[in-house]
Amino acid sequence: MPLDADAVRRGCRGAQVTTAHHLCRAEIGKFRAAVADGEPIIVGCTQEAPLFSEVAGEQENFPPLTFVNLRETAGWADAADAADAGPKMAALIAAASEPVPDYPLVSLSSEGVTLVYGRDERAIEAAKLLAGHLDVTVLITRPKDLAPLRVTEFPIVKGTIRSAQGHLGAFELTVDDYAAPAPSSRGALSFGAPRNGAVSRCDLIVDLSGGTPLFPAHELRDGYLRADPEDAASVLRAVLEARDLVGGFDKPRYITFTEDLCAHARSKIVGCRRCLDLCPAGAIAPAGDHVAIDPNICAGCGQCAAVCPTGAAAYALPPADTLMRKLRAMLTAYAHAGGARAIVLLHDEPHGGPLIDALARHGDGLPANVLPLAVNEVTQVGLEAVAAAFAYGAGAIRLLIRAKPHHDVAGLRKTIALAEPILADLGFGTGRVATIETDDPFALGDTLRAIDPADGTPRPATFRPIGAKRDVLRLALRELHHAAPAPVDIVALPEGAPFGTIGLNVEGCTLCLSCVSACPTGALSDDQERPVLRFAEDACVQCGLCKATCPEKVITLTPQLDFRAATAPARVLKEEEPFCCIRCAKPFGVKSSVERVAARLEGKHWMFQNSAKRLDVIKMCADCRVIVMTEENFDPFGAPARPKPRTTEDYLRERAEES
């Protein structure tokens, strides 16, 4: 494994770089000396991390340690790639040096109350393995000739689960056809009269029914263990896992949610529902004008945060700006060390880590220009990270996912579909962002070697992202535009994009300003002094609330990205003269609207047929209108008598009289 220390020094400017051949064995003294200096240390080895941590712990005040895998990701490769991997090593070390903030936790508690759901004796056998460790109940769906237990170690009942909700420590099931067995059962269990709608609560569910899973994306539901009853090994794994799920547990709070930013609904009119349509675990539900995310159910796929147009849902493991800073450190160090045509490979650790490891140990390893970066979930990657990577100089991005993902990756595909036209119109070319869907390490290597990345931007950005998701997204897109090979002002985007403008049929708009009150981001605004409607495109997230709220239906949405919008002032969509009260001269409405109403009512409505004063009331403000109506003794109930209703008998009688 060749080591290019000079390339690492060029990429990691200011760092003290020490190389070794057997750092964890014969040259452990080098590590002890480095620890004694008290400076933060990055060790290019993850295999021996426990040993290095133990050695560092021997010091009274040992410095922070960070470990990065250089051997499998950059060192073990064919001869040509290994010799050229110095810039990549610098990039990986630089990315590892970026601090990651702590993330909040959610506490779950399980007392071990377990429901084993099955269809035959195999569920009972699994329950016997659990009975000594957990509080077990067996629920058999549509039982056939079940032999009674010699000793009733745990309850056995029959029933079929109609619905299920909850999470580890707090499941609630609705069971139909529920019945308990008769203690006098002889050759086979005989059950009493069944009933529907029984409710069961438990901490764990071991599902051996072989039927449809009780939850969407069931692999992501904590406390729900499902196994094929025909696969004895799978059943045993589920049993062993269930035995360990007793006590208190902490899981990350993957999503930070800010209700005030949510653009889901206003006044019971639904606008944005991007997160609701994408959540595979069913953790998101409407809650009035915003949505609610249940952190106990959330499995951390991050698709809601990736597509949230306002930044109300933001990923916390890590936050978007932290991921962008890692990309910045990686690509900047790679360029300083002499690297070119970088391909950023984003992967998760449970799936991507073993594939990269296998490719290095049994194949040619990753190409020298492929920079792997592990994230918690690939589906958490949003447009801000993609834009930042290309602004920093990446030539291509590949996102590694399973051949058969655990959940739908529609959100990731939407992100790619959104990035493609932006990159293409800015001169980066097509096909720069794509997924690699494989479980085969050799197929991964072949796919990466077949990529022809661009040379990257001639003017790489150096901005350091700090702030909330929407803010860093705007910043990344502006920097991408500045760094683009062929920048343009406007890029047309696909339907559902979080950027765009609105069109207004000016003749049909009455300036009722319902759209202004519905707009959650302030993109639409009015004026305190004059009837005017303004629009700030930079704030528009294309939620559609203005279009859905407009009573005249004169608003249309056009998804696009206008790079000039960030510095452009709000433009006037429509402006009219105010109508001033004819009694006190206070402006109170739109001139054209008041005149139109007066013209339509004059001589056509009973209240305005014979009195000019009554028609003048329409041209007064609310205060003056009340005063005049009181002074003139206007009777709002003085309508002429309505004609009597006519029946069939009336028409027949008139016809007989005429004849």
Image (cartoon, rainbow, N blue to C red):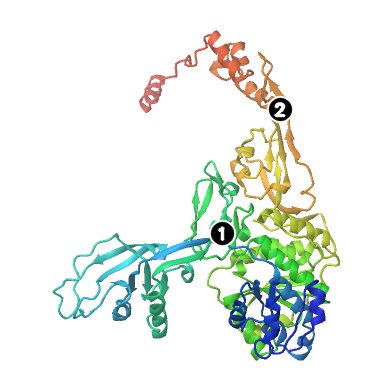
Q: Quadrant of residue 415?
A: bottom right
Residue tagged by mark 2? 529
Disc 2 residue type (three-letter): Glu
> Is 310 rendered above or below residue 619?
below
Q: Earlier in the sequence, mark 1 or mark 2?
A: 1
Q: At x 53% / y 69%, what residue is drawn?
A: 407
Position of the N terminus by quadrant: bottom right
Element class at badge 1: strand
Q: Quadrant of residue 318?
A: bottom right
Q: Quadrant of residue 393?
A: bottom right
Distance from disc 1 to disc 2, alpha carbons, whole Å, reads 42 Å
Task: Identify which residue, 544 or 4, lies in the foreground.
Answer: 4
Compared across the picture, whether 596 is left or right of 15 comes to left
Q: At x 68% / y 48%, what residue is drawn?
A: 540
Compared across the picture, whether 24 is left or right of 275 comes to right
- Res. 497 visible in picture: no
> Is 375 rendered above or below residue 70?
above
Task: Identify which residue, 564 or 32, lies in the foreground.
Answer: 32
Task: Identify which residue, 385 or 105, lies in the foreground.
Answer: 105
Disc 1 residue type (three-letter): Ile
* x then y, percent, for residue 3: 77, 85
Count of numbered circles in the view: 2
* x then y, percent, for residue 324: 70, 64
Position of the C terminus by quadrant: top left
The answer to whether the residue labelled 1 contacts the one labelled 2, judged by CB atoms less than 8 Å apart, is no
Residue tagged by mark 1? 255
